[in-house]
Structure formats: C-alpha cells, structure tokens
Amino acid sequence: MNNSKQAGQLAVLGGAKTINTPFKLYHAMGQEEKQAAIAVLESGVLSQFLGAWHADFYGGSKVQQFEHDWANFFKVKHAVSVNSLTSGLIAAVGALGIAPGDEVIVSPWTMCASATAILHWNAIPVFADIEAATFNLDPQSVEANITPHTKAIIAIDIFGHAADMQALLALAVKYDLKIISDAAQAPGAYYHNKYAGTLAHIGGFSLNYHKHIHTGEGGVMVTDDDIYAERMRLIRNHAEAVVGQKAEINLVNMLGYNFRLGEMECAIGVEQLKKLPHLVARRQAVAMQLHQGLHGLLGLQRPVVKHDCTHAYYVYPMVLNLELLGLSRQIIYDALVAEGVAGLMQGYVNLHLLPMYQQKIAYGAQGFPWSADICRRDVDYGKGICPVAEQLHDQSFLGLQMCLYELTDTDIALLIAAFQKVWAGLDSLRASLVFQEDK
C-alpha cells in the first residue's frame, strides 16, 4: 500500500492516526493564584469560620472578598461560597423551605447531585424530559409533570447553554413554584443579556477542578433575595447552633452543616474570577473553529445556540443522525478514537435509570422516602418517561469535553481533520461492517 493511500485509510481499518501527540491538559492556574495561596499560608489563617453566633460566623477576609467580587461580577445582590456545588444545592433546596414529600422537578440529563440535593430533604425528585437542541429541561415536559405537590424546579444549564428561563419562570408564576438554576457548566454564559445562573430565585456555580475556573473544590450560590441568602449561610454553617442567639424566627430546615469554603480556596477564587471572561472567550473561539470545520458533515448536528444566548462550551455537544449515517454511534466513536480524538463522550446520563431510582431505595432498606406516607403518589421512574434524554444517551449523542485540554489552533485543526477523515471514510466503515457480517 502506498503512503498516500495509507494516509487516507481510517486508523480503525489499519491506516495512520491523524493525531499522534496527546493534547496538553487544561491548566487555569498561574502566578497570581500561587501568590494568593502563599499569602494565605503566610497569614496562618486558613479558615476563620466559627460555627457559633459570632463576628466570624460569616468567614474570614478572603471569604468576604471572594463573595463580594462574585456578586459584583455576576450583578447579583448576594453570593454565598460553599465547599461544593453539591453542598450549595442542598443549602438552596433547604433555604426554599422544601418539605418532606414535596416534589421538585429536575432534569435527568445532569450530574447526580442536582437530584440528590432534593432527596437530602426527603423531598421527591420528578424527572422531566429535555430539549433535543440544547439538552436542557423542556418546559412542555416540565408543565406536564407539575402536580399539586410540586414546589420547585431545578433547571440545569447543561454543557454551557442556559435553560429556557423565560418559559420556566412563566411556569413558576403560573403554578407558584420556585426555581433553582444549576449553572455549574455555564459560568460566563449569557441568557438575554443576563448571566446564566442569575435569573432564578437561587443560582449556583461549581468550582470543581475540571470547570472553566476552579479552586480545586468549591461552589458559589447567588440570589437577589435577602432571606434566601441568609438561610443558605445558616445551613452552610451549623444553623441549629446559632438560630437561638441570632433570634431567627423561621426554623424550617435550619439543619446545618459544615459547607464552608476556606480562605485559601477563596483567595484563589478571587484571582480565577478575573480570568473567567478570557477563559470562556477562548472556549467560544475553539468552538467556532470546530463549528466551521465540521460544517457539512453528513448527519452531524453541531451545537445549537438559541437567539440572544451565548454558550460557555464546557462540552461541545453533537448529535448523530444514525438513519442518514447508516452506522451506529459506537462505530463512529471507535473510528474517531482510533484517529486520536481524546475527550470524546458517548451519551451522558439518565439519572432516573440509576439503581437508586429504579429500586426506590435511598435512606435505609425500606425505600424511604418513597415508601413513607409523606410520598403522596407513586412517582414513575420507568424507562420511557424521558424519551428524548434516553434516545440521546443510548444512541445518538457525542460530546467533546472542552475543559479537559488546552487546545491550540494546531490541535483544533487536527481534531477537524480527524472528523473529516472519518466522514470521508464512512463508505469504508459500512463496507467493513458488511464484510464482517458476511464472514
């Protein structure tokens, strides 16, 4: 076989790989973060929180600075730092006054904490389906799942694109519901000239290590509501120990924890926040290059960005039209991986199909809270309740994890070349499949 023919042959069929050098891992830290961390170490004050009603109940100077800077950046009244967005979502659900047996609608197409934060308060997650274009909650499915027991919606801005907040907020008004916005993957994305995560009653952001900006672990909750902000601060820091001295009247869900973020993480967060616009802009530039380079590939749906929205591209999401391609996702995936494409996802997740929901076992062995009197109806988690999410996960979704790597223009060109090569070799893949079936 001559070199030119071998160069055009798919790697999965014995040809040469397109990408031979691993991409550099994404590294958002710089000298500014290093100096900020050293300054905290030299101060000797790694945390200044006290779990008692005291001047230090709200944390030290770096916690205060970070929360102030975050609130200013996102143009909200309050920012409450927490040690993870998981903790923050638990605090948010509690702050809203969600009670045992209350139903909260959530997406199945998200990290598990978005739903387990509901179960934490012995409330009942109800899964609504998602939009095929943005992978966010479908407002029509949300409305179809609202019952007299529904008290809130947790909307996830998945992959970096905001959920349809106008429609969801209209439902909230119509049915007297509260909305929590999980913007873990969408810091810096816009929805109708406002930041994603800031339009709900409470919003939240993740500072986990593989996000656009991070502090190792951590999160920030945002709200314009004074009461919700204070209730989250109480839940964050041993609420039950301080409500008496604080003369707090509303004791609902004043069951507190240690959800506090330390001085060093907040000092790093101050510096990371300054870089957020640049880091998001870089992901957007990479996505635009991919968008142009993948244009015209048969049966490949590139990311959709709705009118008056921007995308932060935590993931570059794609959907395969398997009918047009005449091949399974697995075959396409294997061919791309063989060409050296890294960070590729097949499907995402369907939370309602996890064992906990299928068997309805969370607390103890008797199926609490579903088996208890507080659960007012038999909530269905069977396969088929979220057909769009299920089809995407099982068959057609492909995602490129954008926050894994520090992609250069050369890397992007290679990624595009790998996709174009695989698509140019679709006939070879189909022929190979026929050959294997005939053997």
Image: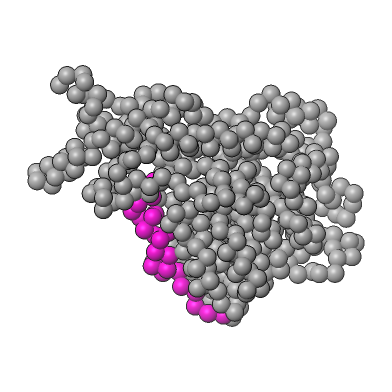
Using the image as rendered, state which of residue 246 and residue 301 is in the foreground. Answer: 301
The residue at the far front in this view is 307
For the image shown, how many numbered marks are present on the structure?
0
Magenta stretch containing residue 107, yes or no? no
Q: Residue at x 67, y 69 (%)?
A: 98
Q: Is residue 323 above or below residue 422?
A: below
The residue at the far left in this view is 439
Q: Quadrant where the C terminus lies? A: top left
Magenta stretch containing residue 392, yes or no? yes
Using the image as rendered, state which of residue 25 and residue 143 is in the foreground. Answer: 143
Q: Quadrant where the N terminus lies? A: top left
Q: Residue at x 85, y 54 (%)?
A: 52
- Write the start and end of the magenta stretch as one range: 376-398
Question: What x and y, as percent, mark residue 308?
Answer: 57, 50
Using the image as rendered, state which of residue 293 and residue 340 is in the foreground. Answer: 293
Q: Residue at x 26, y 30 (%)?
A: 11
Q: Which color mode does the image show?
A: one colour
Q: Which of the 4 image quadrants contains residue 38?
A: top right
Question: What x and y, as percent, mark residue 322?
Answer: 28, 51
Q: Which of the 4 image quadrants contains residue 26?
A: top right
**Direction from residue 413 to residue 62 in the image, left or right:** right
**Direction from residue 58 to residue 261 in the image, left or right:** left
Residue 234 visible within the image:
no
Q: Which of the 4 image quadrants contains residue 226?
A: bottom right
Q: Is residue 231 above or below residue 262?
A: below
**Direction from residue 246 to residue 107 in the image, left or right:** left
